[in-house]
Amino acid sequence: MTSLDSLFYPKSVALIGASASEEKLGGIVLKNILGLKGRVYPVNPAYPELMGLKAYPSIRDLPETVDLSIVMRPAAEVPEILRQHAGKARFALIVSAGFAEIGASVLQEELAQIGRNTGVRLVGPNCLGIYNPYHGLDTMFLPHSCLKKPGKGNVAIVSQSGAVVVSLLEAVRRSNIGVSKVCNYGNAVDLDAPDVYEYLAEDPETGVVISYLESVGNGRRFIEAARLLGDVKPLVVLKAGKGTSGQKAAFSHTGRLAGSYEVFRSILRQFRVREAPDYDSLLDAAKALSCQRPAPGKRVCIITNGGGAGVLAADECMRAGLEVAQLPEPVREMLRSTFPPFYVLGNPIDLTGQVRTGDYRVALDGVRQTYDGFIIIALTGVAGVTLELAEIMRDFRTAAGKPVVAHIAQGGIAGKLTTLLEKSKIPVFPSPERAVRALGMLLHDGG
Amino acid sequence: MTIRDKVEKFLQLQVDRKVFREHEVKNLLRGFGINSPRGMFVPRGAGIPSTFNLSYPLVAKLVSSGISSKSDVGGVQLGIGNGDDLQRAVTELSRMENAEGVLVEEMAQPGFEVIVGGTSDFTFGPIVMFGMGGFFVELFRDVSFALAPLTRDHALWLVGETKGEKVLKGFRGKPPMDIDAIADIIVTVSEIMATGLIRAIDLNPVALYPSGALVLDAKMTRP
């Protein structure tokens, strides 16, 4: 089998259906792949030249066998085009829609057959394809003027849906994190999530993988690849289509109870694959796991300057299976002798609206040994919270070497503080609950 | 013999059936060390043997591969205390539509009811299920699934995935139930499913006790 290196790091790329116009998809993609660290061959019989590159009438006319060919022609033309790929391309990425997703399964099966006969590996159809900022590879028909993609980072995105990839790309960039590889494989006529998982397990640029799935072809193969990937680096899965119930007319109780999502969810848990229950959680998990390494344990300490936010965080810890263990008596005594009498010395530790930034340092140093993970809440609407908090938390994280996440409320210095914290790899979340769930992803293995 | 050998042999003896009869399934399970109440099968038209080695009280259950829920059609009679009542019960049940016979069993002590099942999932193939029985399963769907076959550790994990595990471990002064016994049953069912020879198994309910477990009802089908 061809290594997916040819797909993610192609030395040469052909674009079937390249166009001169940036208004057309074939022009957008051509412009986007001009940044490739490799050779680009536009294919279009109507032009001698496109965007300054020599154009070719067909893939057969190319001077070499390309690693990757991007096919952007109407569905009906694709089988014939693919046949011409025999011996001329290692991977064919079929962007075109109009296959199984609209019921044209026969046409799609024809592609599968051609792939098997020619030995060309297929991606798609009905997909955006690949984005690899480490290689200047961008097969997605999204003009850079409309969607600014995230830069280099350690998060890989593997998604069945193109729409979800587009919104994740935007959200990931806004979360100040970068990506290593992005793959939208669409109808999965050949290349499927497990192939990509196997590749990413070995990919040195990838530190964490988030994956959006609607269906998994072969469940056994999927779970095996997910498990092997999860052994090496965190994988977080979001499964859409949770509503399907069990077989209604099943003879047995088991059959009636075995809804496809319930089974999927149980089996993910059986093999300790992280599951994000929803879109926000997937994104938050990516952010947390891209900044910090997972760690064992589940004892959490919450330090806040607002009582309500602390209680919300504690409530969510309970739901997330994290333990908000009481402060040890010696720690409480130490803090009692330092802090004003109206600070609430439990867990959460409530430094109240009269907090001074340095109090966070005292509290954090006091609890460092006792807990496995930390949630820092700072409501910046009060005068006592300053940007020094970023430095305090950075020092603490370095010293503790354990997961630390933050919820910074809106207002005042919140924006600046968030930027400073995220530069120091302390992820900041817009609500106490989301901060807790993200910490839960970091403490996943402590269970 | 391996589990596969035993299941294959069982299927060879049952070539004409897709849905197996309760007493046959229970006999198969006994061969794997899974207990059920002592009983005897009385085929339709045959009389009750003049002597039999069962102790009252007894239960009598309709055996019919065409009916998936015996109790819904009045096919179960409980608390049979003497020979006359037994004769009456067997006669009544034998007259029911599609009756193939009657399974007479010793009535089990009340236990904590759980379900162990197996089915072949469209995506994952053979899977195994554990859940709380009785109204828990109807009302709360307190069940969990795993890939088959599974290890003993994963069987214990599967039990722990249900909310009912707290009750099994001894709740409010009640004695803890024999979780090891249920783990054994789960592992065996998972291994039967993993042969790929069986479409579905339903042990519902299994009565769980502080020591041991009894399969009270059992269904099994082949593809």
Image (cartoon, coloured by chain):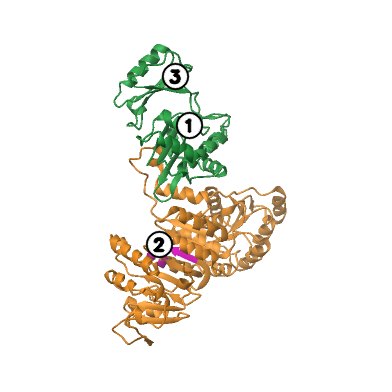
Q: What segment is highlighted magenta in the picture?
A: A156-166
Q: Amino acid at mark 1?
A: Val
- Chain assignment, label 2: A
Spatial CA distance of label 3 from label 1 is: 17 Å
Residue marked by disc 1: B206
Residue at x 47%, y 65% (from the top left corner): A157
What residue sits right under mark 2 in the picture?
A160
Q: Quadrant of residue B80?
A: top left
Chain in orange (letter): A
- Label 2 SS: loop
Q: Does residue A268 lie above or below A204 as drawn?
A: above
Closer to the camera in the image, B215 or B27 = B27
* Image position, residue A267 (x, y; %): 48, 49
Secondary structure of the residue carrying tag 3 is: strand
What's the residue type where badge 2 is placed? Gln
Residue B176 or residue B78, whichever sits in front: B78
Q: Which residue is mark 3?
A: B58
| Colour green, chain | B
